Image (cartoon, rainbow, N blue to C red):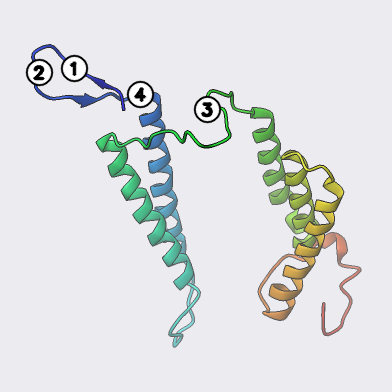
């Protein structure tokens, strides 16, 4: 923690450096996500007579986010900054790889745009394979196949087995003929 002293002052005040400002911004984002999640959780319609409805998990996540955000805000305002890890195998002075971040954001935007068209199972494969490729996988085609298996598995488990809505994809309507599994 960096401090500044004014001549003749008995107190030492922490300085608002870049690290402390970054912690305050992160704390505000976490707290804001908690508020957003809580508002969204209470917007969920619950059928009458249901003891435990679909609001329970989102409210729990919102409470955890709000608590974490509040603790982070307090710690940032107090100027409590954790010391840098000396044992990690990273260069703390390395520049941010904006190209990688841009590719990851582009993948997330592509998921949002293609989800209804291609369906969850295909988009999950593209996301998994794309993230693996972006982060330097030696064999991204293997990651694409693993993503396809995960996408199909979650589609079958949650979409077909539990009856939850996961988009199947308008591009593959010809494949989902009538039947017990995809009808």
- Residue identifier under label 4: 17
Mark 4, other Cα within 10 Å: few <14 / some 14–19 / many ≥20: few
Q: Between label 4 and label 3, give the one nearer the viewer.
A: 3
Q: Earlier in the sequence, mark 4 or mark 3?
A: 4
Label count reads 4
How far across and down, in percent of the image, does residue 154 sit? 72, 69
Q: CA distance from mark 2 to mark 3?
A: 34 Å
Query: Where in the figure is residue 109, as x and y percent of width and height?
Result: 68, 44
The quadrant the C terminus occupies is: bottom right
Q: Nearer the viewer, residue 72 or 158?
A: 72
Mark 3: few, some, or many residues within 10 Å (few <14, many ≥20)? few
Q: Nearer the viewer, mark 4 or mark 2?
A: 2
Whole-number angstrom distance, CA of label 4 to CA of label 2 = 21 Å
Tell me the SS state at disc 4: loop
118 with respect to 96 (left or right): right
Circles 4 and 3 in contact, beta carbons < 8 Å? no
**Measuring 48% from the left and 78% from the top, which residue is drawn there?**
53
For image coordinates 86% across by 59% down, the residue present is 171
Kindly identify the residue that appears in the image at 80 percent across and 62 percent down: 169
Foreground label between 2 and 3: 3
* Upstream in sequence: badge 1 or badge 4: 1
Report x, y in % for residue 163.
68, 78
Mark 1 burial class by Cα count in 10 Å: few <14, some 14-19, many 20+: few
Mark 4 or mark 2: name the one nearer the start of the chain: 2
- The first of marks 3 and 1 along the sequence is 1
Q: Residue furthest front?
A: 87
Residue at label 1?
5
**Label 1's element?**
loop
Neighbour tally class for label 2: few under 14, some 14-19, many 20 plus, Cα within 10 Å: few
Q: Is residue 89 above or below residue 112?
A: above
Q: Which residue is mark 2?
A: 9
Q: Which residue is mark 3?
A: 92
């Amino acid at each position: 923690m960096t401090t500044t002293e004014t001549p003749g002052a008995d107190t030492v005040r922490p300085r608002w450096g870049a690290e402390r400002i970054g912690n305050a911004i992160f704390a505000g984002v976490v707290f804001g996500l908690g508020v957003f999640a809580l508002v969204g959780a209470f917007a969920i319609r619950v059928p009458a007579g249901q003891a435990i409805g679909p609001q329970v998990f989102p409210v729990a996540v919102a409470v955890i986010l709000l608590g974490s955000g509040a603790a982070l805000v307090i710690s940032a305002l107090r100027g409590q900054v954790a010391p840098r890890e000396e044992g990690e195998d990273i260069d703390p002075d390395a520049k941010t790889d904006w190209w990688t971040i841009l590719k990851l954001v582009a993948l997330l935007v592509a998921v949002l745009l293609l989800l209804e068209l291609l369906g969850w199972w295909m988009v999950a494969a593209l996301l998994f394979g794309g993230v693996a490729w972006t982060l330097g996988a030696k064999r991204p085609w293997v990651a694409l196949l693993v993503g396809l298996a995960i996408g199909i598995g979650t589609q079958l488990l949650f979409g077909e087995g539990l009856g939850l809505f996961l988009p199947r994809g308008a591009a593959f309507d010809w494949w989902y003929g009538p039947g017990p599994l995809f009808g």
